[in-house]
Image (cartoon, rainbow, N blue to C red):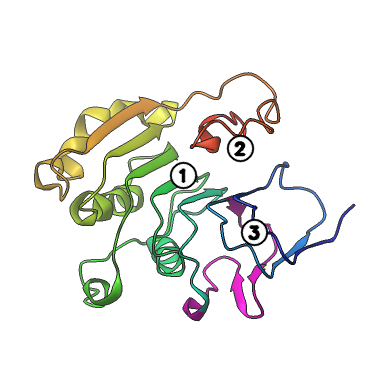
Amino acid sequence: MLEQLIIKDAPCLSRLLFHGHGDEEPMNILVISAPNLEILGPLCAVRPGITFDAGATIQGSSIFRSHMRSSVKVLAFKDMNLSLDVVIEFMRCFPCLEELFISTKYSGKKNEWRHRRDLDKDLDIRLKKIVVRNYRGNQSHVDFAKFFVLNAAVLESMRLELITEEYSTIEEQPTLLHLNERASIGAQFDFVPYVPEPGSPYQHIHDLSTADPFERYPYWN
C-alpha cells in the first residue's frame, strides 16, 4: 500500500482526485509544485494531511492561509460533518474557488454565522455552484446553505440532495433558506432526492472532458 505521494514539479497537473472507500491505510500527500492545479478532492475526515509547499497543511480545518492556492477552482469533500467554519477556511485558502461539492453523513456542526463580523472583511465568495448530498434540512444544514444563499453574490446554482426520510421537508426549504432574499438574483435552486447511481466509481477516471468530475463518480461519497 502506497504510504506517501510527493508531487515535486507538475506544471501540467490540473486534477488531483482521490478514489477509495475510506478504510485504506492513510497516505501522506505533499504538493511541492503544481501551479495549475484546478480540481481537488474529495477530501474526507479520515484522509491524512495534504501539504502544499513546505507549510500549508490541509487536514480538517488546519489551513495556513499564507500559502493560498488561487489556481484551485473545484473542491469536494466526502463524509463531512457539515461545518461552515471549515468551508470558510478552505475558501480563504483557495480564494478563486468556483465549485463546491459536499457529501455528508452527519447532522452537522452549529453553523451560526450572523454574529461573525469578520466575514465581511476578507472573505470574497466567488462560488458559482454548490452541491450538498445527503442534505437533512435540519437547523445546522439550513444555516449552512442559507449563508451562501444570502452571501454568494455570483452563485449560479445550488443543488441540495435530500435523504429519503427528510424529503417531506422540501416544501419548507425555500422559506427556511430565505430564497426571496438571495444575493444572486439569477441563481437556480434545486431540491431533489438523493439517489446513488449504479456503476463503478472508477469508470470515468480517465475522462477529462467534463469540468465537473464529481458529477461523474456516483460513489465518490
Q: In the orientation shown, which residue stands out farthest toward the front?
A: 11
* Magenta-tinted stretch: 40-66
Q: Is residue 134 left or right of residue 35?
A: left
Residue in the image at 63% along x and 30% along y: 207
The question of residue 56 being in magenta is answered with yes
Considering only order in the chain, which callout, 1 or 2, is on the residue closer to the N terminus?
A: 1
- Disc 3 to disc 2, C-alpha distance: 26 Å
Residue 53 sits in quarter: bottom right
Considering only order in the chain, which callout, 1 or 3, is on the residue closer to the N terminus?
A: 3
Check disc 1 and give the amino acid type: Phe
Q: Are marks 2 and 1 in contact (CB under 8 Å)?
A: yes
Considering only order in the chain, which callout, 2 or 3, is on the residue closer to the N terminus?
A: 3
Say few, some or many: other residues with alpha carbon within 10 Å of mark 1 (under 14 / 14 to 19 / 20 or more). many
Q: Where does residue 89 sit, x and y in percent of width and height? A: 43, 69
Which of the labelled discs sits on residue 80, or is there none?
none
Residue 20 sits in quarter: top right
Residue in the image at 41% along x and 47% along y: 99
Q: Where does residue 18 sit, x and y in percent of width and height? A: 68, 47
Question: Which image quarter is the C terminus in?
Answer: top right
- Disc 3 to disc 1, C-alpha distance: 25 Å
Check disc 2 and give the amino acid type: Trp
Check disc 3 and give the amino acid type: Pro
Position above or below: 157 against 48? above
Q: Secondary structure at mark 3?
A: loop
Which of the labelled discs sits on residue 11, or is there none?
3
